Image (cartoon, rainbow, N blue to C red):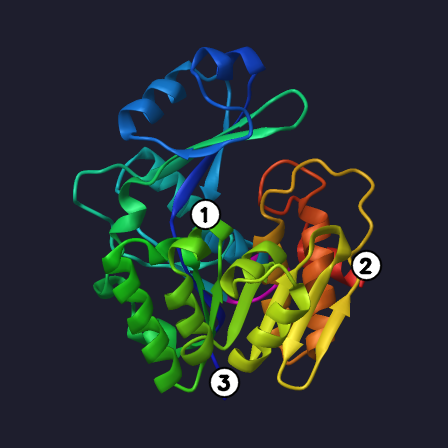
């Protein structure tokens, strides 16, 4: 069945603001080094005003995955909520410059576009303060039925399962995708997220999601076990495909018929692990939407993830299509 888009991503539209800081800046503002915390708009603005030169680019987990897919040469689309403000323009411009279809109505509730201040210490430790702003105001009305029906896979991020309206938006997208004979995919996002929504995520894995992405810790949390083989066998009963990232060990791909371990690619100059999972999903889905076998999908995911961790930020800084051709 032909499709216009290989993958449609739905997620939190966040602008990443990357900036180098000294540790005494964190200490002065009582921000624990290496933490990731949610802050209000006032705190975010105050910190932003005191930071030096920064790199600003569109971010958010699903948006990083979609950007990776675009770099690999996939046709991609994105749904996420921004405000018509300065950071909203940064986000929209970035996404459009990558050739990604992004037509979501702007939020007019008065809150600003979401942003994540990513403060990088001299030893590469990252400390994040996130203001969620407009991105959590995604609703069912933002889900474009034609876009979902035209996408081979609709990919959603678990972080958006927190707000009730966004949850309803996800349910609508999953129903539309399956009614159109398309695939649904979910990334579990982080183990705290899984802990909050364990029963619902299990139900989704069993009944609504075709392709599940998780890291090892998230999968263990989902199935209440410390034994990875138990968790892999459990997810095998639920999803058509589960792709589990395992850090330096690579990944494990689970389908009804088999459980495949795929070695990671050695990385000599590890700089920043942010976005490794997002870009793994990009590589995997790029292969999947082109009909590659699951082992090859996993290899592409591992390769793309190994590129992203050699530099700052969660966006590729090489042409991934060429990188794939040169290295796979």
- State whether residue 13 is above or below residue 250: above
Q: Which disc is residue 60 wearing? A: 1
Q: Which residue is mark 3?
A: 2
Label 3: which secondary element: loop
Label 2: which secondary element: helix
Q: Which residue is mark 2?
A: 327
Q: Nearer the viewer, mark 2 or mark 3?
A: 2
Residue 179 or residue 222, whichever sits in front? 222
N-term mark: 1 or 2: 1
Q: Which residues are magenta?
A: 70-75
- State whether residue 72 is above or below residue 87: below
N-term mark: 2 or 3: 3
Residue 290 or residue 261, whichever sits in front? 261
Q: Which disc is residue 130 wearing? A: none
**Could you tell me residue 62's position as x and y percent?**
47, 56
Label 1: which secondary element: loop
Asked if the stretch drawn in magenta spans residue 73, the answer is yes
The crowd level at tag 1 (other Cα within 10 Å; few <14, some 14-19, many 20+) is many
């Amino acid at each position: 069945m032909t499709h216009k888009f290989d993958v449609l991503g739905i997620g939190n539209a966040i602008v990443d603001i990357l900036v180098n800081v000294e540790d005494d800046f964190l200490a002065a503002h009582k921000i624990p080094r290496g933490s990731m915390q949610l802050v209000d708009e006032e705190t975010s603005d105050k910190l932003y005003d005191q930071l030096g030169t920064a790199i600003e680019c569109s971010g958010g987990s699903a948006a990083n995955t979609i950007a990776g897919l675009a770099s690999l040469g996939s046709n991609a689309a994105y749904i996420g909520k921004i405000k018509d403000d300065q950071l909203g323009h940064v986000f929209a411009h970035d996404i459009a410059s990558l050739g990604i279809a992004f037509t979501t109505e702007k939020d007019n509730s008065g809150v600003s576009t979401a942003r994540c201040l990513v403060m990088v210490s001299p030893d590469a430790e990252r400390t994040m303060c996130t203001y969620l702003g407009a991105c959590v105001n995604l609703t069912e009305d933002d889900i474009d039925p034609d876009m979902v029906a035209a996408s081979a896979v609709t990919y959603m991020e678990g972080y958006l399962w927190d707000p009730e309206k966004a949850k309803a938006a996800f349910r609508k997208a999953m129903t539309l995708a399956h009614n159109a004979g398309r695939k649904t995919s979910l990334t579990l996002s982080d183990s705290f997220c899984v802990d909050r929504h364990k029963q619902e995520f299990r139900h989704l894995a069993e009944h609504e999601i075709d392709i599940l992405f998780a890291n090892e810790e998230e999968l263990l949390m989902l199935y209440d076990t410390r034994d990875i083989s138990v968790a892999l066998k459990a997810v095998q009963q639920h999803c058509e495909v589960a792709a589990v990232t395992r850090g330096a060990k690579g990944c494990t791909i689970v389908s009804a018929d088999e459980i495949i371990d795929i070695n990671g690619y050695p990385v000599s100059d590890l700089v920043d692990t942010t976005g490794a999972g997002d870009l793994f999903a990009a590589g995997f889905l790029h292969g999947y939407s082109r009909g590659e076998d699951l082992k090859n999908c996993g290899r592409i995911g591992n390769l793309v993830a190994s590129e992203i961790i050699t530099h700052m930020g969660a966006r590729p800084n090489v042409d991934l299509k060429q990188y794939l051709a040169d290295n796979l």
